[in-house]
Image (cartoon, rainbow, N blue to C red):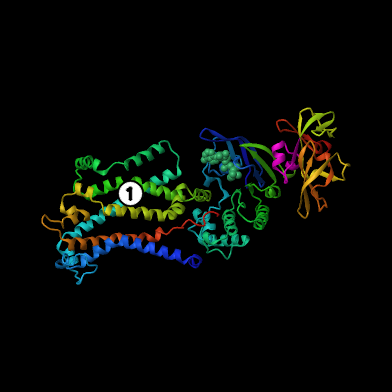
Amino acid sequence: MSDTTRRNPMLMMGKSAAITFYLTFALFPLYWLLKIALTPDRLIFTEGTNLAPSEITFSNFTSVLFKTDFLSYFGNSLIVSLGTAAVTTVIAAGAGYAFSRFHFSGKKIIIAVMLITQMFPLLMIIAPIYKIIASFGLLNSLSSLIIVYTAFNIPFATFLMQSFFDGIPRDLEEAAMMEGCTRFQALRKVVIPLTLPGLGATLGFVFTAAWSELLFALMLISKNDTMTFPVGLLTFVSKFSVDWGQMMAAGVLALIPSCLFFIFIQRYLVQGLTSGAVKG
Amino acid sequence: MARMEIKNLMKRYGQTEVMRDINLDIKDGEFIVLVGPSGCGKSTLLRMIAGLEPISGGEFLIDGLRMNDMRPRDRDIAMVFQSYALYPHMDVERNMGFSMEIRGDDKIKRKQRVLEAAKVLGLENLLSRYPKELSGGQRQRVAMGRAIIRDPRAFLFDEPLSNLDASLRVEMRLEIARLHKRLGATMVYVTHDQVEALTLADRIVVLEGGNIQQVGSPLELYERPANRFVAQFIGSPTMNIIPVSPAKNGVTLANGTKISLSDMLDLNAAAELGIRPEHIDVLPYGTGDFDAESEVVEHLGSDTNLFVRVDGIGPLMVRVHGNVPNQPGDKIGLRFQLHNTHIFSADGQSLGQRITLAA
Ligand SMILES: Nc1ncnc2c1ncn2[C@@H]1O[C@H](COP(=O)(O)OP(=O)(O)OP(=O)(O)O)[C@@H](O)[C@H]1O
Ligand SMILES: [Mg+2]
């Protein structure tokens, strides 16, 4: 590292500038979210585009938490997202392992079909999905969302998991089997520990996708007590006005679980876990 | 301890047959080395013995017991992988003790065995390191340690030394030889390295294109190669091959020189003569069987390699013991050591060689 700094300070400065620019660009909306959430209602329009509000208030947060159904939406979202992430990851890990390690007839077809499911615009299949869910009597239930989200996330999650399994040398499993493991033991003792980064990434990806999904939640849920957070957010838009302050406060709160989740899994996302397995 | 029998073994990947009709009897405690060019099926054969690759045809038995459908874990064979295959999430101690951990041996016994093995391999100070914190040679030793810790019936090695530097290779080679002596276990060893093969093996198996070309002791293969392929594959530098035509009681080289091999049988099919560089004598100009001009001279210290050109025959390589004063451009005479001359038919089969008949 220090070698490159010494060799080319211009390059390092350029890099820092690029990173700073990117971060500003990516984080600015979040800052704006926070800023509006903290701005008192009466100042929102008068101070419009000022970078910082002249006064700060937490009233938006307190009213969101205690005067609206926000906590219930939040809880629903948590159940749906965690449920989806867990179910999807388990299934995707199994499927990804099979794709990575076994040859079986129909493998190519299954992969092709999974790819095709990713090509349809969601809008096209909303109506049939609605009919199917309705005929099972699952409308307005959280489990309907878990089922639909799982179905939609599995293909991508499977490919993701497969690529992680592909990254683990087969020799490791074979060595374990030579040393007395059954295939399942080899999986549990050698492969799974090495796939933790992959499992973490998949969990994170699916969790975030489910957390912010709006379209299906809007279609399948119409009762207030099973609404998820993105749908609930729309209740801040009334016929005549939009309650910006509360909406933004709710948005800030909604970021918390995502952040916590990533802090929790980030140690599994550290790369290089397999280094040293094979020579080189 | 294990005696292995391989009978008519065959391997197919889909439609392609990569090994056919492999027959090999490995005696208890024998050190077998598999050699052959890349892609000839060495690893495949080893993996079929290990149970990692299904057997497409034929039989494989250990101590008379059919192994074809036996899982790797039930064969009780240890394998050292070409890639070492250390578990990256376990430290050296756990890597080495893994088989005992799986078997459910108690912790104290495990620790003790690991320590013993680590001492043999000089790893006792590295037990708490992770594989990524080890050098190539250290990883290689951990891989060996993992195999020896459990007292298996047989050991399989797939080019275990191929990534080590020269001096470490020599050291590890000796280590393996010592190990074999100490344990007396059956070992099957794959290598590309001539020296490893010749020094370690009780018997060498030469494979080519999925077929066994010859099986024999290192000396047998060197002195009595069954065909041209083996003759050229074993021995370094490579044997010279010269086209010849049959003559009365001998053969004639392309430049007209007659090599008389009176007591060799049936030379009518003779098409090529093989002679190792170390079996050509260098004589003063005009006094040999024929003359040559040296083009390149390599001084290796203990030996000298002469690359010479012979009119009507082409280039030959000659190895002379010790340092000789020859310079490029020198004219010299050459003579073949007749008892080390090999004759091959047009399809590459050996027509015998004087040493076998003279003996
Ligand atoms: N999974 C596979 N599918 C199809 N062919 C294969 C497969 N694995 C190996 N082969 C073929 O089988 C033959 C033998 O391969 P193998 O790995 O045993 O060679 P090798 O002698 O160990 O070579 P090397 O010295 O390069 O390691 C090769 O021609 C290879 O292309
Ligand atoms: Mg190989």
Residue B76 percent across, percent down from the top left: 56, 48
Reading the image, the residue beneath label 1 is A88
Q: Position of residue A198 (x, y in %)?
A: 40, 53
Q: Nearer the viewer, residue A181 or A9?
A: A9
The quadrant the C terminus of chain B occupies is top right
Q: Is residue B42 visible?
A: no
Quadrant of ligand 2: it is top right
B160 lies left or right of B333: left
Can residue A95 be seen from the camera position used here?
A: yes
Q: Which residues are magenta?
A: B220-242
B252 left or right of B44? right
Q: Residue furthest right?
A: B287
The image shows residue A156, relative to residue B114, as above or below, that is above
- Residue at 21% across / 69% down in the picture? A53
From what the image shows, is residue A273 above or below residue A177?
below
Vertically, is B322 above or below B44? below
Which amino acid type is marked by label 1?
A: Thr
Which quadrant would residue B264 be assigned to in this image?
A: top right
In the rendering, at what x and y percent does residue A55 appear? 19, 72
